[in-house]
Image (tube, rainbow, N blue to C red):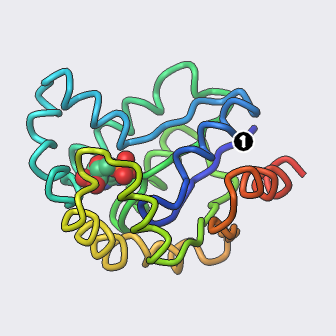
Amino acid sequence: MTRLIFLGPPGAGKGTQAQILASTLQVPHISTGDILRAAVSDKTDLGMKAQAYMDRGELVPDDLVLDMIRERLAQDDVKPGWILDGFPRNVPQAIALNKVLEEINQAFDRVINFNVPDEAIIVRLLARGRKDDSESVIRRRLEVYREQTAPLIDFYQTQIITVDGNRPMEEVTAALKQVVVG
Ligand code: AMP
């Protein structure tokens, strides 16, 4: 049973690594960013509400994201485990996640924290060229990370494992597999 929370700044490579590990472990990769981008492109109610926040690099309001996660974790394919990528993003979301997990009789196994210095992040994000990857939005996303998401490192203090994400992708994958699979 593998239930993992991936934590780290934007552009730390969490998404790529989550995808690789999810396929190795045969569990769903749950990315709130991906779900939100799909909602925006499908112009659903959720997408319409979320878009302006995403375009500015702000967090989408907790209640919207929490409804989304609650619904996703209730689906059948998550029974063997999951990798959460991009959620929780602040302490209230982390507290809410604990509650949701308690309700469905699940618990997470580990929190993996991807450590990457700011300079490397900015270079990576500018290279990625997503719609919300303009330099001013990147700076805002980094600020939001520092103010709201980084405190989760303390919140999960006893359950966290830090991985150096500032290395070639294959090396990060190898380190991650060692930590998670052994
Ligand atoms: P990401 O793909 O994880 O970088 O997320 C892209 C954008 O989606 C973020 O900048 C936020 O606007 C929004 N987002 C993703 N996950 C969350 C979350 N857990 N809480 C609030 N907003 C989120």
Q: Quarter of the image holding residue 18?
A: top right
Can you identify the residue that label 1 sits on?
2
Closer-to-camera residue (83/95)? 83
Q: Is mark 1 within 8 Å of ligand 1?
A: no
Identify the image quadrant of the N terminus: top right
The percent coordinates of residue 17 (x first, y second) are 63, 47
Q: Quarter of the image holding residue 21?
A: top right
Q: Secondary structure at mark 1?
A: strand
The percent coordinates of residue 164 (x first, y second) are 68, 70
How many labels were placed on the picture?
1
Closer-to-camera residue (152/71)? 152
Amino acid at circle 1: Thr
Q: Is residue 146 left or right of residue 160?
A: left
- Taking the spot 63% from the left edge, 65% from the top edge, the residue there is 165
- Taking the spot 13% from the left edge, 24% from the top edge, the residue there is 43
Vertical placement of 75 versus 12: above or below? Answer: above
Q: Is residue 35 left or right of residue 83?
A: left
Closer-to-camera residue (67/56)? 56
- Taking the spot 46% from the left edge, 28% from the top edge, the residue there is 74
Q: Is residue 23 left or right of residue 154?
A: right
- Taking the spot 63% from the left edge, 68% from the top edge, the residue there is 166
The percent coordinates of residue 5 (x first, y second) are 57, 53
